[in-house]
Image (cartoon, rainbow, N blue to C red):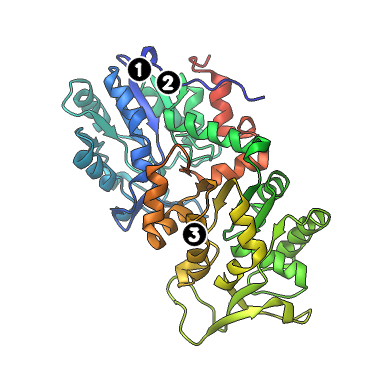
Amino acid sequence: MMGEIPIVSKKDVKGNVVLIRVDHNVVKNGMVEDPYRIERTKPTIDFIIDNGGYPILMTHIGRPRDKKGNIAISNNESVDPIVGYINENWGYKAKVVPVDLSKATERGLPSLDDSINAALKELKTGKVQILYLPNIRWFSGEEEKEGQVRDRFTEQLASIANIFVNDAFGSPHPHVSTYWVTKELPSFAGFLMRDEIKKLQYLLNLPGKEHPFLAIVAGEKIDTKIGALESLRDLADNLLVGGLPANALICAKYNVKINGIGETETRIAKDLLDKDKTENKLLIPDLVMVSDIECNKEKQRQEGTYRELDLSTIKEGKNLGYVYDVSPNYFKKPEVVNAINRAKTGFINAVVGFDKAGFKEGTLVLYQLLDKSTARLYFGGGDTLTALKKYIPDFYKKLIENPVKHTLFTGGGTILDGFESRGVENMKVINTLIENGGKKPA
């Protein structure tokens, strides 16, 4: 049973500097792509300001750190557009805490500099209502797993505030700004965190009256999602797959090869198929779009180089080449239409095709079917929300305007982690809030 998560309250806030971790990772090419995740944190920030607190926000933008640990600082991954959005739309004066970028090394910024003191004075005297730290992943200690660099950055973040509030449901990784700072400050959950945990818990314990439950999952990997896929197969009445998970399952089911799917992925998929033999919950596409040429974000698909393939006609051992989408015609099949139409609850973390290369038709037809569904729908994942807004904006608007019935989770990866662990108490970042209980650590 999940422990009690401490929620920020009036008495915790009044007169205190409040360090708030948010997930405002919505900047692309130097612009706010979709303000939904910014707006979802507004109730927490309003509450803190209204009750005499002084908020300092921090978020990550993108992935500026490479596999070698080097950090690239780019204006395209700055928080400036977010602060501009807040100033323009919220009626508050927000300010980015200035840092001396000339002090950055290939490992990023070593720390906040003395400018934080002047910024704090402006916050406490009311010249600004919100301070915003630079992209938190620009700092060398943020993603370090251990060592003095991490510990020093943790201590510095803790030194500028009295309490910590985590409202970043979409940032589940145990970094300094989500996890280690809770070891130094009394720590609480914000309202977004509370609401999305409740909804995740509901899905994990979905009552019988809310079945049939349809889960739809796609993505670029199967190995990191296998635990979530296994859990969703158990919890749901049907699990429909797209993307690389579908390709791996196709290889395992039809004994064929697809570029990008290796023996490890096929073996993982085969294990999932074996577990499904008696229940037949898996919906694996048998009509797909194959391409004669490799495509990517830079090399978009070209007319005449891709076609629909019916897998029931394929001989074992054949190499299908590049499979980049589920055919729109697959979503016209009775078993798929029936699974969608009869569902009372749906969880969707899925862009079923490689839309970055132009393969969007499968996703579009799927979303159109969901638009007509009477089910209570839960969507998760930044790519999923982006695709919804891009391809079927009226449906996206309808989902936002009806939050009582439908949910747009701000964190797709967090939701999948929750399904994999079968409970949020096993998720490290959230569990540390439970353990600390809002009390100042010893």
Task: Say few, some or many: other residues with alpha carbon within 10 Å of mark 3 (under 14 / 14 to 19 / 20 or more).
Answer: many
Count of numbered circles on the image = 3
Which residue type carries mark 2? Val
User: In the rendered image, which residue does mark 3 sit on?
Assistant: 367
Of residues 400 and 65, which is closer to you in this image?
400
In primary-sequence order, the first of circles 2 and 3 is 2
Q: Residue at x 69, y 43 (%)?
A: 235
In the rendered structure, find residue 116 and report the number of the disc placed on it. Answer: none
Residues marked 1 and 2 touching at CB (< 8 Å)? yes
In primary-sequence order, the first of circles 3 and 1 is 1
**Is 393 on the left or on the right of 345, as rendered?**
left
Across and down, in percent, residue 182 comes to: 49, 25
For residue 24, say whether it is visible.
no
Across and down, in percent, residue 276 comes to: 79, 55
Q: Is label 2 in a helix, a strand or a loop?
A: loop
Q: Is label 3 in a helix, a strand or a loop?
A: helix
For residue 253, say whether it is visible.
yes
User: In the rendered image, which residue does mark 2 sit on?
Assistant: 8
Task: Say few, some or many: other residues with alpha carbon within 10 Å of mark 1 (under 14 / 14 to 19 / 20 or more).
Answer: many
Which residue type carries mark 3? Tyr
User: In the rendered image, which residue does mark 1 sit on?
Assistant: 13
Of residues 306 and 68, which is closer to you in this image?
306
* Quarter of the figure that contains the N terminus: top right
